[in-house]
Image (cartoon, rainbow, N blue to C red):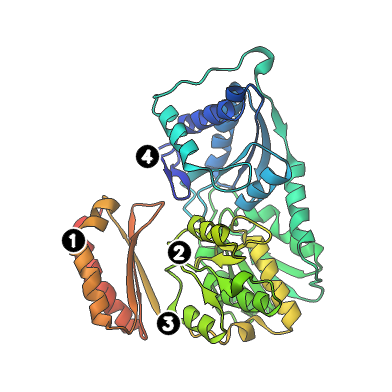
Amino acid sequence: MKYFGTDGFRGVANEGLNVEHAFKIGRFVGWYYGARQQRKARVIIGKDTRRSSYMFESALVSGLVASGADAYMLHVIPTPGVSYEVVDGAFDCGVMITASHNPYTDNGIKLVNSEGYKMDEDVLELIEDYIDGKTEVPLATGDAIGCTVDYMQGRNRYIAHLIASANFSLQGVKVGLDCANGAASSVAKPVFDALGADVRVINNSPNGFNINVDCGSTHIDRLRRHVVEQGLDVGFAYDGDADRCIAVDERGNVVDGDLILYVCGVYLNKHGRLTAGTVVPTVMSNYGLFKAFDDARLSYETTAVGDKNVYACMRENGYSLGGEQSGHVIFGDIECTGDGIMTSLRVMEVIRAERETLSQLCAPVKLYPQELVNVRVGDKDAAMSDEAVLAAARQAEEFLAGRGRVLVRASGTEPLVRTLAEAPTEELCREANAFVLRALEPHRA
């Protein structure tokens, strides 16, 4: 793919991704799902809170209606809200404008099909051909021109769906929420309020520039302090588009996606709700998680990094739980993509049902120290195919001699090579990573 990566078309706003790209995506999608089939397409659009999202929204809507589609605007909403409402409202496809956990200077366009899944690659290839001028799409005229619809009721239905998914009360529970000044800002608190929780929210005043800035699931320290200082029972942090969730227990300890998979996996299995007794983590999950799964007699099937890969495995095998250490967790019985707010509700379900604190529920998992280093490179494909880098990774594995592992991979969305070392001590992690970092030095940007 030239433009679309593992998580949509991303880039620095008006540099890597510009308004002409957005307009053309709208033009093609509006025609492909509508006029191409002699019908009028219905397309739903959501966005996060970064300043450029409004610009891209306007460009996409213009492209859609120019091709004859009707554009339904959800405005600011989490990415999973778009996936939910595409299905709930029987739309032809959905568009989410977001760069997730990236800085506000970046943005992206994610497309989902009518089933709420990430768009099929053959359609994305056709869009790329149109962007590059290899194909033409006719303009709609007369009464065939599409219209725009202010579709706020779609967001309200998504909030109602989240509330209805919780068959328990949170009366008397003190919950901290870090909304990352992003898409969760207008959704998370109303959900927890409706369930009766005593909600203490931080980072829910977006101004277009503060999304993900020292807050949210990628900057957890402020929520950790907030939970401890306010004496809260639990805390949840989301990323910019709220498809991730990282929790904080009552002691201020971080409960990442691995620990959430354990807590929810054990609970669901206990109640006969974990299909085949199997959880789907990724290769980036901690070795300690796998050992805890073994101790709990849970099976697991690992996938490549990316919630797309996790869900593909879940869908193919009918598994009901999977996710990533980063906080993408998918509950296959109720959703087809990670939903940070839904994840926090599922964690609360376990806490309430088991009558234990989050720290007690996590206690059986003994995580190994990890060191993850991101190296910005000029060409990540060249770096990953460099024999010196590959040899260094093998040397690092030999150095650990079965005491841990080293995983080297390219980022799917940024010009980065990530090297992860996992071992019994932090010092061993650093020493193992050093092999790979020396080999990557010539590739640094």
First-in-chain label (2 vs 1): 2
Choose between 327 and 262: the one closer to the eye.
262
Q: Amino acid at mark 3?
A: Tyr
Q: Which residue is mark 3?
A: 368
Choose between 408 and 192: the one closer to the eye.
408
Position in image of residue 238 (x %, y %): 59, 62
User: Dot 3 lies on which element?
Assistant: loop
Position in image of residue 356 (x %, y %): 70, 85
Where does the N terminus fall, quadrant-wise? top left
First-in-chain label (1 vs 3): 3
Quadrant assignment, res 39? top right
Viewer-side label of 3, 2: 2
Vertical side of 101 occupied by 245: above or below: below
Q: Amino acid at mark 2?
A: Thr
Number of the label disc, if any, that sits on residue 303:
2
Q: Which residue is mark 4?
A: 2
Most extreme residue toward the top, as rendered?
142
Vertical side of 221 occupied by 96: above or below: above
Horizontally, residue 356 falls left or right of residue 295, namely: right
